[in-house]
Image (spheres, helix red, strand yellow):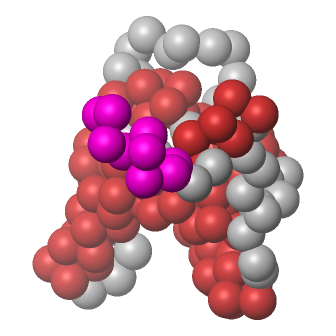
């Protein structure tokens, strides 16, 4: 997701030889591979607030201003995406990201977290006798 964002910011100097949509798709593939619902929800929230919310906000303002999806030149100027890439981005966002994020929220409600405790911490779990407390 960071490479996708960097490539959109610096359109003159691409960080990789892949397109922005390919980078976005691969980041969603990695996001979908996360098995723990709590981690997936927290990471989705982080991705939304860090990378996606500002782009959707800018697109919403453009649509409200113009009354329809902006043309290619204006899309590229404001969002660094042409009209075709913008439509692909919105499809991937709605089909993959939002659905997976909502599933992680509902699955989290049924998920019981398992916390493993290292042997190192076992010493601190044992109850302390009153004699030992008096020495402290």
- Coordinates of residue 31 in the picture (x, y in percent): 72, 51
Q: In which image quadrant can residue 46 be found? A: bottom left
133 relative position to 128: left or right: left
Query: Does the segment drawn in magenta span residue 133?
Result: yes
Which contiguous range is marked in magenta?
A: 128-136
Name the image quarter holding the C terminus. top left
**At 72% from the left edge and 57% from the top edge, which residue is drawn?**
115
- Coordinates of residue 37 in the picture (x, y in percent): 71, 68
Q: Nearer the viewer, residue 34 or 14?
A: 34
**At 61% from the left edge and 49% from the top edge, which residue is drawn?**
125
Q: Nearer the viewer, residue 88 or 134?
A: 134
Using the image, determine if residue 81 lies above or below residue 98: above
115 relative position to 39: left or right: right
Q: Is residue 75 visible?
A: no
**Count of numbered tags:** 0
Using the image, determine if residue 2 lies above or below residue 61: above
Q: Nearer the viewer, residue 24 or 59?
A: 24
**At 15% from the left edge and 78% from the top edge, which residue is drawn?**
65
Using the image, determine if residue 115 lies above or below residue 136: below
40 relative position to 10: left or right: right
Name the image quarter holding the N terminus. top right
Q: Nearer the viewer, residue 117 or 15?
A: 117
Query: Does the segment drawn in magenta span residue 94?
Result: no
Q: In which image quadrant can residue 15 be found? A: top right
Q: In which image quadrant can residue 93 be found? A: bottom right
**At 34% from the left edge and 82% from the top edge, which residue is drawn?**
68
The residue at the far front in this view is 131
78 relative position to 4: left or right: left
- Coordinates of residue 101 in the picture (x, y in percent): 63, 73
Q: What is the magenta segment's predominant secondary structure? A: helix
Q: Is residue 105 visible?
A: yes
């Amino acid at each position: 997701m960071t490479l996708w964002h960097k490539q959109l910011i610096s359109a003159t100097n691409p960080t990789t030889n892949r397109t922005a949509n390919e980078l976005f798709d691969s980041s969603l593939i990695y996001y979908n591979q996360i098995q723990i619902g709590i981690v997936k929800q927290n990471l989705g929230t982080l991705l939304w607030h860090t990378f996606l919310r500002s782009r959707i906000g800018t697109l919403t303002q453009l649509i409200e201003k113009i009354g329809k999806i902006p043309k290619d030149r204006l899309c590229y100027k404001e969002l660094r995406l042409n009209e075709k890439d913008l439509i692909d981005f919105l499809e991937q966002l709605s089909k993959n990201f939002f659905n997976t994020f909502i599933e992680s929220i509902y699955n989290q409600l049924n998920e019981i977290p398992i916390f493993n405790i290292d042997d190192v911490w076992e010493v601190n779990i044992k109850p302390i006798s009153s004699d030992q407390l008096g020495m402290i």
